Amino acid sequence: MHFLDQAKIYLKSGAGGPGAVSFRREAYVEYGGPDGGNGGRGGDIMFEAVPGLNTLIDFRYSQHFKAARGGHGMGRNRTGASAKPLVIKVPVGTQILSEDKEEVLADFTEIGQRLTLLEGGMGGRGNASYKTATNRAPRQHQPGIPGEEMWVWLRLKLLADVGLVGLPNAGKSTFINAVSNARAKVGDYAFTTLVPKLGVVRHKGREFVLADIPGLIEGAADGAGIGDRFLGHIERCRVLIHLIDISGTGEQDPASAMRVVEEELEAYGAKEHAGLADKPRLVALNKLDLADEELVAGFTDELLEAGAEKVFAVSGATGEGIGKLLDAVLSYLPTRTSTETKAAEVDDGDGEEPDEWSPI
């Protein structure tokens, strides 16, 4: 499945049906009078957050959504049928933005959340509703009220408890594969990860969702590399894990690598008001299997002097030190994460063991 986290779509609610002009005509009934019914209401445009989706790829091929119009009124005082609402299903974490992307119109953070974005037009009045004591045979009627229309942007921000950041080739893909059920691509070259990946981590009886995003390089806030467009997927995380290659990335030592990523997070936060720079971060020196104890101790001291609160030495390839890092992650999570709540609800519902759940 291809990943798409932004899409522009056109929406139009249904117009109301026109009212009818009709007069009662039956044998042996004199003075029949007007009996034109009112038109039906047009269909609404609704959005619903549903489980099982983690991409907006469907909106690449379907970009225009128009609700049905209401039925027209008919004789014998029959009102036209109201059109059914058009329900557009989106992944949890989707935001609806105005066409200029300046205003957030809706934010779907829970499964089953619904919102009526555009209301259908009211049906027009039939001539029966115009009848008065002085106007016994009205012939006027109302056309249906037109529906509303607008262009909107859909932007997906994946819901995860923990985010994984770092420079390219820091070992993020290997790490998420080691601790979760994800199957991210691993390669000995920069930008192996091109789109965000999600994985469910199970540690000491707890479960949480870990998100891995493409690596950041210096100038990402200005569009360098893949840029910072995927940073929105970790805005909702409670804690970030900053992986740093202990063997050095290019000519950068670990302290410089940490500084580059920190500056890009601050630049993105200033631009998007995301507050990423204020999120708690756990700094981890990765690829421990490629370094000796003396080198680890030296780089740890440098990172602490550069501003890191605590440094963990881990190896995504061998699993060394990962347990302590995950222990620290659990201290930042609530008593029960959304993943655990979902599993508990399934278990309480039928008394059977819940199936393993994964957002990917």
Image (cartoon, helix red, strand yellow):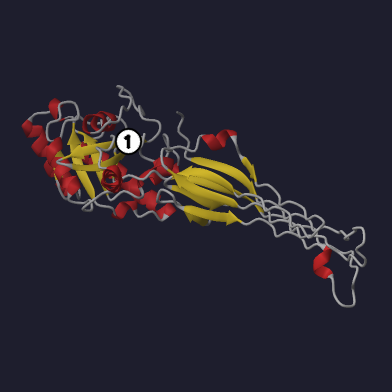
Q: Which residue is mark 1?
A: 358
Q: Farthest residue toward the left?
A: 294
Q: Farthest residue toward the bottom?
A: 133
Could you tell me if residue 299 is visible in this image?
A: no
Seen in the image, is 10 located left or right of residue 223? right
The image quarter in which residue 220 lies: top left
Residue 290 position, x and y percent, is 15, 26
Instruction: Give the quadrant of the C terminus.
Output: top left
Residue 345 position, x and y percent, is 29, 47
Seen in the image, is 144 located left or right of residue 344? right
Return the residue nearer the eye: 255 or 66.
66
Tell me how many marks there are.
1
For numbered disc 1, what is the local secondary structure? Answer: loop
Residue 325 position, x and y percent, is 16, 41
Seen in the image, is 346 located left or right of residue 20? left
Return the residue nearer the eye: 242 or 134.
134
Instruction: Give the quadrant of the N terminus.
Output: top left
The image quarter in which residue 242 lies: top left
Return the residue nearer the eye: 310 or 153.
153
Density class for disc 1 (Cα within 10 Å; few <14, some 14-19, many ≥20) is: some
Return the residue nearer the eye: 161 or 124.
124
Q: Farthest residue toward the front?
A: 28
Seen in the image, is 84 located left or right of residue 51? right
Q: Is residue 187 shown above or below 72?
A: above
Residue type at mark 1 is: Ser
Could you tell me if residue 60 is visible in this image?
A: yes
